[in-house]
Image (cartoon, rainbow, N blue to C red):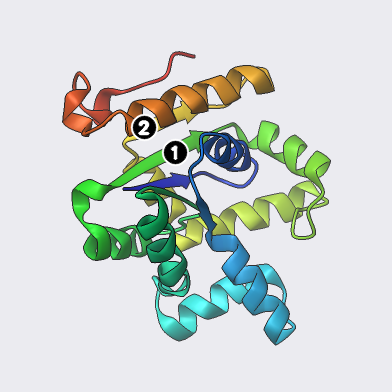
Amino acid sequence: MLICVVGMPGAGKGEFVKVAREEGIPVVVMGDAVRREAERRGMDVGEMAKRLREERGMDAVARLVEEDVERELRRAGVVVIDGIRNPEELEYFRDRFGERSVIVVAIHASPQTRFERLRIRGREDDPDTKREFEERDERELGFGIGDVISRADVMIVNERVSLPEFREKCRMVIRAILRGDPDDLPGGFDHLRVPD
């Protein structure tokens, strides 16, 4: 089973990933593959993401991490994929691993909340200014991330909650997914919503 976590930068995907790891689930971070390729080519990460998709197609990053995903699936039977950015990547995984084997979890937070989080996080590719933040959002939306978010099986809202509360929401969702077939849940995952 693949649990694909998606969300705009700063929404809380990293915390979801930490909880997944605490639950013993291996994680493949698509952005790490882009960062490695950017470093290899001496390019900016954002430009590298764009270039990869221009050169190799919109599912390029999914293909870059496929071996990692397969290895972790063989080892653990479940893997979290962090960082799907477009419908083509999602479809690549669904085609490769089976429609019912892929669950999409979207993490949502407002732009203002995300901007503040990114400023605090301070990763190399995080924006320093509101303008840089907006440009990054536009780039992400241009990749098609909004389409993937709209197709999510589960939406977790990460707004006006403490970090421990958000992490508990993540844990509840992960455990619900791991309990079995989505049809075992009332209404399936399409109707599974974690309380605000």
Q: Is mark 1 on a helix, strand or loop?
A: strand
Q: Which of 172 and 45 is in front in this view?
A: 172
**Which x, y percent locates residue 91?**
28, 61
Name the amino acid type tagged 1: Ala
Task: Name the residue beneath numbered marker 2.
Answer: 154
Q: Which residue is drawn at 18% across and 25% down?
A: 184
| Marks 2 and 1 in Cβ contact (< 8 Å) | yes
Q: Nearer the viewer, residue 24 or 116?
A: 24
Q: What is the spatial separation of the Cα atoms under label 2 and label 1, in whole angstroms?
A: 6 Å
153 sits to left or right of 195: left
Q: Which residue is drawn at 47% across and 46% down?
A: 6
Q: Image quarter for residue 109?
A: top right
What number is the disc on residue 106?
Answer: 1
**Badge 2 density bin: few <14, some 14–19, many ≥20, Cα 10 Å:** many
**Which x, y percent locates residue 190?**
25, 30
For residue 57, above or below residue 133:
below
For residue 116, above or below residue 91:
above
Q: Image quarter for residue 92?
A: bottom left
